[in-house]
Structures are given as C-alpha cells and as structure tokens.
Image: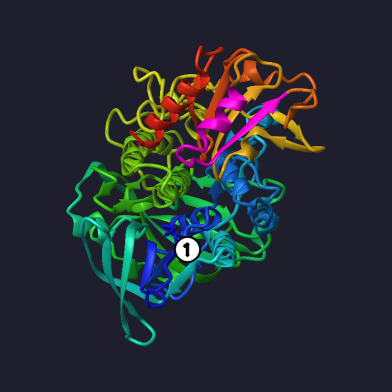
Amino acid sequence: MNRFDVAGEAAGHRTPVLIVGGSLVGLSTSLFLGRLGVPHTLVERHAGTSIHPRGRGNNVRTMELFRGAGVERPIQEAASVLAPNNGILQTPSLVGDAGEWLFKEIDPGGGLARFSPAGWCLCSQNDLEPVLRERARELGGDLRFSTELMSFEQDAEGVTAQVKSRDTGEHTTIRADYLVAADGPRSPVRERLGIKQSGQGDLFHNVSITFVSRGLADVVGDRHFIVCYLTNPEADGALLPVDNRERWVFHAPWHPEHGETLEEFTDERCREHIRRAVGVPDLDVEITGRAPWHAAERIAERYADGRVFLVGDSAHEMPPTGAFGSNTGIQDAHNLAWKLSAVLGGWAGPDLLASYDAERRPVAEVTSARAAARSVEHSHPGYIPVPGAGSPQGRKGGILNEVLGYRYPQGAVLGADRTQPVVSDGLRLTGEPGSRAPHVWLNRAGTRVSTLDLYERSLVLLSSEDGAGGWHSAAARVGRQPAVPLDSYRIGDGPDAELSPASDTDWAQAHGVTTDGAVLVRPDGFVAWRSEGASADPVAALRHALTAILGLG
C-alpha cells in the first residue's frame, strides 16, 4: 500500500504528518508538504492568521523556495504596497536631513541577478500568511484553526496526539507518523520533550505599536525606507511603514527587567513617544494596537526527538535585525519537507531524517550570532549589548553570504568538505556538495528557466549532451532499482538535449565539472554529489551516491 494512503481510517484521525502551529513556518511546512503530495493535518490554537504587521523581510533564498512552490507572484502582489521601499535609515529625527543610511538599497546595481532568479520581498506576516494558507488548502492541507494540542505521546511507529476545538470543546485523537512542531519560541512540544536551549537568552524587549497618522507621510517624504531607527535618547525606537500613507508601526523599547509593565504603555504615552521620536510635537497619531515582543538568541540542543521535529522559533530564536529568524524557519521547513516525503514515500531510509538536525542546527547557530551582531551594528533601540558582542565601527556590511552561502558540511551529502565552515568569508556558489546549487539560465522547450526551477519534487542529475560520461543512461537504470524519483537532464544544443544553455552560459563550469561530469541536486536545491569528470562505471558511482545520500544502505 502507498504510504500516503490513509483509506480505512476514521476521517481526520489518521495523517502521515501532524503540524502543530499555523503561523508563518507552520503554514510554509503545510505548503511544501502539499506540493510534494504528502497528506497532513495542521492545528493552530488561534482562530486565524496574524493580524499584527511584523516579520516583513523575506530574503532571496526564501523567495526562491516560494518561487519553486508556485506562490512567488501572489506574494509579490500582496507586498506591492511596499515595493518602493528600500534601505535602512538611522536618524535623530525625521525633521530635516540629519541622519545616515545604513544602506540605501537592498540590491544596488542589480548584482543579485547573477546569483538568483528571485529577489528580496517586503511582505508583512499578516499579508503573507493568508497567501500561504489559501494555497496550502488548495493543495489539500487539512488546516484546523481554533484547535489546540493538548498532549501527545510517541512510540516506535508514530505519534498519538490529543487536540481540542476551542470553538466546540470537542476532543479528537490524531494518529500521525510524524509530528512537526512549529509552535513558537515558548514551544509546549519542545518543553514536553525536555529539549534544552543554549545561547545568550533574552537580549532586549520592545512594544510594537500600530498607529494611524495622515501627516507622517509628508514628514517622511520620499525616504521610502524599510525601517527607520530613530535615535533621540529621550524617545528612541524603530519606525516601519505599513502602507506608506497612513498606517505605521513603531517599536518602542520596553524594560520589564526594571519592573516596567506593558500596562504603562498607555495610548497617551505611546502617542507622545512617537511624536518626540519623529520630531513633530503636534503630529496626528491614533494608536490602534500594541503587542510585546522579545528579542532573544536561543538554539535548541537538538531539533528532533524520535518522530518529533522542531522548526522555526521552536528550534531557534534570533533578534529581528536582518530578518533572519522567519527566513531560517521557512528554510527549516523546506529542508524537512522533502525528507519526510522521501521517507514516507518509501524511496529513502529513516536515517535521512537524522540529517535534518545535522544540517539545519549549525546554520541556526551561525545565523543567530550574525543576527545579534547585526543588532549591534544597527544600534537597535533597547539593545544594550554585552562587551565584545560587536560594535558599529566593526560593521560587516551586507548579509548575502549568510542568506545564500550557507553550507551543509555534514548531512545528506556526499563529498562535502567537512573542514569548511557553515558560512565562509566569501560567497561561493560553484557546485560544491553541500552548497546551494548555482543559478544558470537555460531554455526548455522554448521557455526560459533557471536551473533552480528544476528542483522540487525529485532528485535531479545534470550532465552534458555531448559528454562521454554516460550519466543520462546510468540515471535511467539506477532510478528504477529502487524506485527513486530521479530526473535526468542533458544540457546542450543538439537534438538529444532536454535543456539548452542560454547564450554565453557554461553550465558545467558554473557547477565545477567538465563536460564529461555530472551533478546530482537534491529536491531542496542543494548539491548532493558531483563527479567532476567521467567515471569508469557511472551506474555504480550514481547508485553509491544515492544509497549514501538517501540512507538506503
């Protein structure tokens, strides 16, 4: 029987994957599993998606994943109001021309196009989550909002969870093969498993204040920033546009460690704080909401316990500067989704799932440290760093290397250099095993595609049409025994090629191989293995690679 077949079970009581948490990362997990045809159930205690503008920075790697999942365009449409916004401004007030741009453009000169077919996208979480929810449901996701996880137990064969409808009070038992916890930084699932955390802990606290001001747009003028750090020592904070017209968010420092309570942030206090920070004493300000948030650096000591996996904030917390946290969580979900699909589909061994922790936890450790340093570099309001945490004088500049250049020295890869750091000093996307596969433009049946567009549902083998390696025929033989989804593409200008290179494109050189070599890419777009040249026995070489990577030995 197909492992995805749940026929014969009580409706809704049996599912291959149970996702706990229906915020950004949980919905992304649902989307990615749905794209791979994996039935799943998601439970979320809240009645709907986020209503507070937050988490707006979707980096280029995340947008590559959303491009592959078919939602890049609707996300861009949801984000269209912030499309003109670029850069981060730091200034004592918005009156006059004081201050400096920490950076003025996300992609100056359009250089990012060399590395990716996608780009950065400013889409607030309250606008992004509905797009993900709608598409996840279209793909068959069983999404249950107003439903709370009460308890769970796991055994050698699966996980049994008790959930409760917060609308009706009805309790339901759900039996799943695997549970994915996307239940936030205070994760009850992580606590239940007794998984400890490491890191600096709480770094600083803010109150996020939503407000309406019709006059603020005139004060801002043509400075269409992503965020503006206002540095008046009597009223510092961070200002973020919501619609560039009248809806705004202000992050004010909050010090609960000094006994300050959330109730002290009255409408009047918030209104006067914003006016002083902006520099306009009579600015019209209508407070519409407030929500506390906490910046922290914590990493779970392990990302898995048996059949339970942590993703997103349940696995790691990071300061918001650089928008690393949500992006890292979405990329967690993408990494885990294809591995769950492979194991449930029977074309990978259970050991493949162990590579999730081996790959993603080191990335979080490096990224969280960079996010904390970025908070120092930007002098984030409310953050008083410990000595040695970094300084504005030691700015590193951009973050593209952390966004695109992270690597998996260990995990479901073969031939990776384990001595290399997770993030190197320079951005190297040249086809090394364990790195994100290079972006190269190709033509497929008259349509322009990126190599990254080839990766999602299967492993992919790239080789040259005129190469002497025999890799294409080897892939046809190896993919049948066992039945591993393996797509093989020959690249060239002849009649046997499935793909033709764009002008002035050398796909083999970009991937670090000769025309007789081959590159094996995972469904998540990371290079699993490569042969720089021909092999005496390409069938044996490819079979060995697949066996090692997929845990089939």
Q: Percent from the top left, x then y, of residue 126?
A: 54, 63
Q: How crowded is the residue under tag 1: few (<14 C-alpha within 10 Å), some, or many (20+)?
A: many
- At numbered mark 1, what does the secondary structure look like: helix, strand or loop? strand
The quadrant of the rendering that contains the C terminus is top left
Examine the image and state in which quarter residue 420 appears. top left
Please state the total of marks drawn on the protein image.
Answer: 1
Look at the image and tell me whether residue 144 can be seen. Answer: yes
Examine the image and state in which quarter residue 421 appears. top left
The relative height of residue 345 versus residue 366 in the rendered view (above or below) is below
Residue 157 lies left or right of residue 513; in this view the side is left
Q: Kindly identify which residue carries mark 1.
A: 209
Whether 475 is among the magenta residues is yes
Q: Residue at x 51, y 21 (%)?
A: 530
Q: Percent from the top left, x then y, of residue 336?
A: 41, 46
Whether 494 is among the magenta residues is no
Q: Which residue is drawn at 46% across and 24% down?
A: 433
- The magenta region covers 471-491
Could you say which is closer to the camera, residue 39 or residue 385?
39
The relative height of residue 336 versus residue 378 in the rendered view (above or below) is below
Residue at the extreme left: 194
Q: Percent from the top left, x then y, of residue 486?
A: 55, 37
Q: Which residue is drawn at 51% across and 40% down?
A: 524
Could you say which is closer to the camera, residue 168 or residue 265?
168
Look at the image and tell me whether residue 398 can be seen. Answer: no
The relative height of residue 202 versus residue 482 in the rendered view (above or below) is below
Q: Residue at x 28, y 53 (%)?
A: 307
- The amino acid type of the residue labelled 1 equals Ile
Q: Percent from the top left, x then y, of residue 170?
A: 32, 85
